[in-house]
Image (spheres, rainbow, N blue to C red):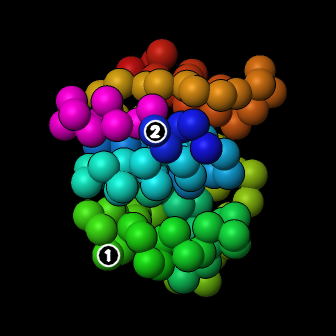
Amino acid sequence: MNYILNVYWIYLEMMVIVSGLALGCDTAAHKGCLQAGGKTIVVVASGLNITHPKCNNKILQEEMVNNRGAIITEYPFGIKANPTRLVERCRLQIGLSQKVIVAQSSPESGTMYAVQFAKNI
């Protein structure tokens, strides 16, 4: 993915990547950051023992935990992600962020919740 290569400038600025590990550019941003030696935080909308989406389990377990990454949640073990929790996750992501970059989104995307939270800070 091109996003992996393009995230290097963020690392050079000593920024931390914060996102929810959604498919696409979120996943690529975390991978690129880790490959560049940067720091990254994943905010999940479930308990720490549940990966959403499941295909990102390897990224969480191997790459994030072993390479300067952090995984945070406000939910206890066993709680699954749902639409309400995904919106709440956006609030946490924005609360941890100084800047917001939307690399890819449709107007109906959950990303727009994050944009609205950022506008209201």
Residue ID at (57%, 27%): 103
Instruction: Classify 10 Å Cα crowding around label 2: few (below 14), some (14-19), many (20 and above).
Output: some
Mark 2 — residue?
5
Q: Main secondary structure of the magenta part?
A: helix
Q: Is residue 68 above or below residue 7?
A: below
Residue ID at (44%, 78%): 62
| Residue type indicated by callout 2 | Leu
Residue ID at (61%, 83%): 78
Give the structural element (helix, strand or loop) at label 2.
helix
Looking at this view, is 108 or 12 the one in front? Answer: 12
Q: Is residue 11 left or right of residue 5?
A: left
Tell me the quadrant of the picture where the C terminus can be found: top left
Give the structural element (helix, strand or loop) at label 1.
helix
| Residue 118 in picture, x, y percent from top left | 46, 23
The reply to whether the magenta stretch includes residue 7 is: yes
Which mark identifies residue 66?
Answer: 1
Give the extent of the magenta segment: 6-14
Would you identify the image quadrant in which residue 74 lies?
bottom left
Instruction: Report the number of numbered marks.
Output: 2
| Residue type indicated by callout 1 | Asn
